[in-house]
Image (cartoon, rainbow, N blue to C red):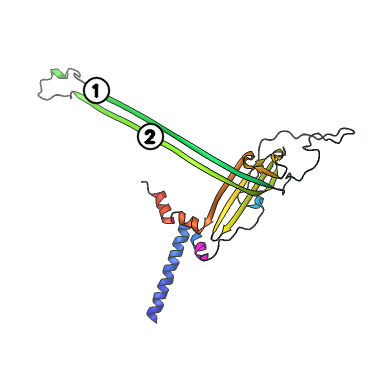
């Protein structure tokens, strides 16, 4: 019984050491992953985007505010964007649909060649009458410095990339800039089995670019930030292990 207790105690110590090592390398994420074995990835809670860590209000160059003026016997107000009010997003908290349609294709190829050859040869044949010295050995050698160098470089590079992304995501107006432009941000999470796909869209839009059905194309978003990725078991398999990532950073070769 004593031997069994000692072995059990050593096993617990070894497991604790492994957990501490994994916590040190992975920022304690390994412990969280171990606690989620056999469980589906949890969806993030719906929160106010402006209260998230790292959120920063957008500041852009703004024109001077236009003072609204009313003319007698007129239904039109100067500075108004529309005669009748519509249901399109226009103030903080409103929703609009962003149509993400990205088709990116690039094919680049370049080559750079460089070559250089240099030669240095210097010497002294007579230094203060050294040739008149009647010693069998020469005071100074015939050549003091002789150098040769040759360098060449040949660099080639090519890029062949093709990406396509088509989807829709609802965004929330988080800020209205002084000139009327809207700052929008939207996030979508979809869980399929044990994998979560995430889509994040953020940027600045003009109310005039919003369609009558309250949608806007991603190509009309200024300062657009679009991220599409995932997390889960498949993503974990595709990522290198912590030890390999550490070695990639530390090894100079």
Instruction: State the residue at coordinates (46%, 39%).
Output: 160
Q: Which mark is residue 155?
A: 2
Badge 2 crowding class, 10 Å Cα cut-off, few under 14, some 14 to 19, many 20 or more, is: few
Judging depth in this view, the residue of 204 and 55 nearest the camera is 204
Determine which residue is flagged by label 1.
Answer: 122
Give the spatial CA distance, label 1 vs label 2: 34 Å
Which circle's residue, 1 or 2, is located before the other in the chain?
1
Tell whether 115 sits left or right of 223. left
Under circle 1, the secondary element is strand
What residue span does the magenta drawing correspond to? Answer: 31-37
Residue 151: x %, y % from top left: 31, 31
Please tell me whether residue 98 belongs to the stretch shown in magenta.
Answer: no
Residue 140: x %, y % from top left: 18, 24
On the question of residue 49 being in view, the answer is: yes
Judging depth in this view, the residue of 7 and 142 nearest the camera is 7
Q: Which mark is residue 189?
A: none
Q: Quadrant of the N terminus?
A: bottom left
Above or below — where is 50 with respect to 210? Answer: below
Q: Quadrant of residue 85?
A: top right
Residue 77: x %, y % from top left: 83, 35
Judging depth in this view, the residue of 204 and 61 nearest the camera is 204
Judging depth in this view, the residue of 69 and 37 nearest the camera is 37
On the question of residue 27 being in view, the answer is: no
- Residue extending furthest toward the bottom: 1
Tell whether 38 sits left or right of 146. right
Tell whether 33 sits left or right of 170. left
Residue 224: x %, y % from top left: 61, 42
Q: Quadrant of residue 81?
A: top right
Above or below — where is 16 with respect to 114? Answer: below
Under circle 2, the secondary element is strand
Instruction: State the residue at coordinates (41%, 68%).
Output: 14
Badge 1 crowding class, 10 Å Cα cut-off, few under 14, some 14 to 19, many 20 or more, is: few
């Amino acid at each position: 019984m004593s031997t069994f207790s000692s072995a059990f105690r050593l096993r617990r110590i070894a497991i604790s050491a492994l957990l501490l090592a994994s916590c040190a390398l992975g920022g304690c994420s390994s412990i969280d992953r171990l606690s989620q074995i056999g469980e589906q990835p949890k969806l993030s809670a719906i929160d106010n985007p402006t209260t998230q860590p790292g959120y920063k209000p957008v500041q852009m160059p703004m024109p001077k505010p236009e003072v609204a003026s009313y003319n007698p016997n007129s239904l039109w107000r100067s500075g108004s964007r529309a005669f009748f009010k519509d249901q399109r997003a226009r103030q903080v908290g409103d929703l609009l649909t962003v149509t993400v349609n990205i088709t990116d294709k690039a094919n680049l190829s370049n080559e750079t060649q460089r070559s250089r050859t240099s030669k240095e040869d210097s010497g002294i044949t007579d230094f203060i009458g050294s040739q008149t010295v009647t010693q069998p050995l020469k005071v100074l050698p015939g050549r003091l410095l002789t150098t040769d160098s040759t360098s060449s470089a040949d660099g080639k590079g090519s890029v062949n990339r093709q990406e396509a992304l088509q989807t829709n995501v609802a965004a929330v107006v988080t800020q209205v800039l002084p000139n009327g432009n809207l700052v929008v941000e939207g996030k979508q999470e979809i869980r399929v089995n044990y994998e979560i796909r995430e889509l994040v869209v953020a940027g600045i839009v003009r109310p005039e670019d919003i369609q009558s059905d309250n949608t806007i194309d991603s190509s009309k978003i200024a300062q657009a930030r679009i991220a599409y990725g995932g997390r889960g078991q498949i993503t974990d398999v595709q990522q290198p292990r912590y030890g390999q990532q550490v070695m990639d950073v530390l090894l100079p070769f």
